[in-house]
Amino acid sequence: MMNQTDNVQKVLEALESNENTLSELYKNCSIIDHDDYEFWIKISSDETEHGIWLSELSQKVSEGEVHVKDDRFKLEALNGIGSYIKSCIADSKTSSISNIHALSISLDIENSMLERGVFKIYETDDIELQNVLNKLRTSTGIHYLEVKNKWQEKRTQQ
């Protein structure tokens, strides 16, 4: 049977994996959308950085420096998001998706993470966890706005 730390580690690993998978998707989008290569590479790099933050947090949890409640995140929901991102990666590799479609996918993912409250902060959260979640929530909000602006820009060009 898994203990609380094992469960938290699995959740943090899922969060980290989702961020790294999202980075991979955005790299693929940079290939699809040559005109906005820098845009996609920047947000891909940001997602890689998010994965590093989560990896560092995971290390601190395993060392007992940070405490996270066992039921803080829903592993099934995180795995569902990860599966969706992976299916989008597969689609981006096997089909010729348009720039606007790539932006729509990105907009959907970033919005979903915000709406589901993936990085929501609770008063009972450890201060270190609060700091990481706040950075992730802020960055995800920025990505959502950047992608939305780019999506609107592309829509007006059509």
Image (cartoon, grey):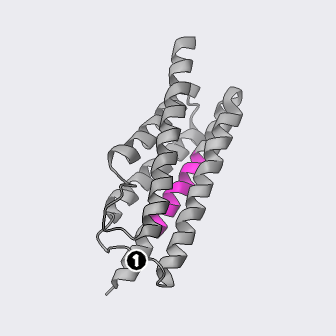
Residue 27 at x, y = what percent? Answer: 65, 44
For image coordinates 56% across by 35% down, the residue present is 95
For numbered disc 1, what is the local secondary structure? Answer: loop
What secondary structure characterizes most of the magenta part? Answer: helix
**Start-end of magenta stretch:** 12-25
Which quadrant of the rendered structure holds the N terminus? Answer: bottom left
Instruction: Using the image, determine if residue 31 lies above or below residue 128.
Output: above
> From where the camera sits, is residue 158 visible?
no
Residue 37 among those drawn in magenta = no
View extreme (left): residue? 71
Which sits in the foreground, 75 or 58?
Answer: 58
Q: Which amino acid does label 1 sit on?
A: His
For image coordinates 40% across by 81% down, the residue present is 6
Which quadrant of the rendered structure holds the C terminus? Answer: top right
For image coordinates 51% across by 62% down, the residue present is 16
Residue 22 at x, y = what percent? Answer: 54, 50
Counting labels gives 1
- Left or right: 71, with 143 as reference point: left
Instruction: Using the image, determine if residue 150 lies above or below residue 38.
Output: above
Residue 24 among those drawn in magenta = yes
Residue 55 at x, y = what percent? Answer: 56, 69
- Left or right: 122, with 65 as reference point: left
Q: Mark 1 points at which residue?
A: 67
For image coordinates 42% across by 62% down, the residue present is 130
Residue 14 at x, y = what percent? Answer: 45, 64
Mark 1 burial class by Cα count in 10 Å: few <14, some 14-19, many 20+: some
Quadrant position of residue 122: bottom left
> From where the camera sits, is residue 134 visible?
yes
Instruction: Using the image, determine if residue 86 lies above or below residue 144.
Output: below
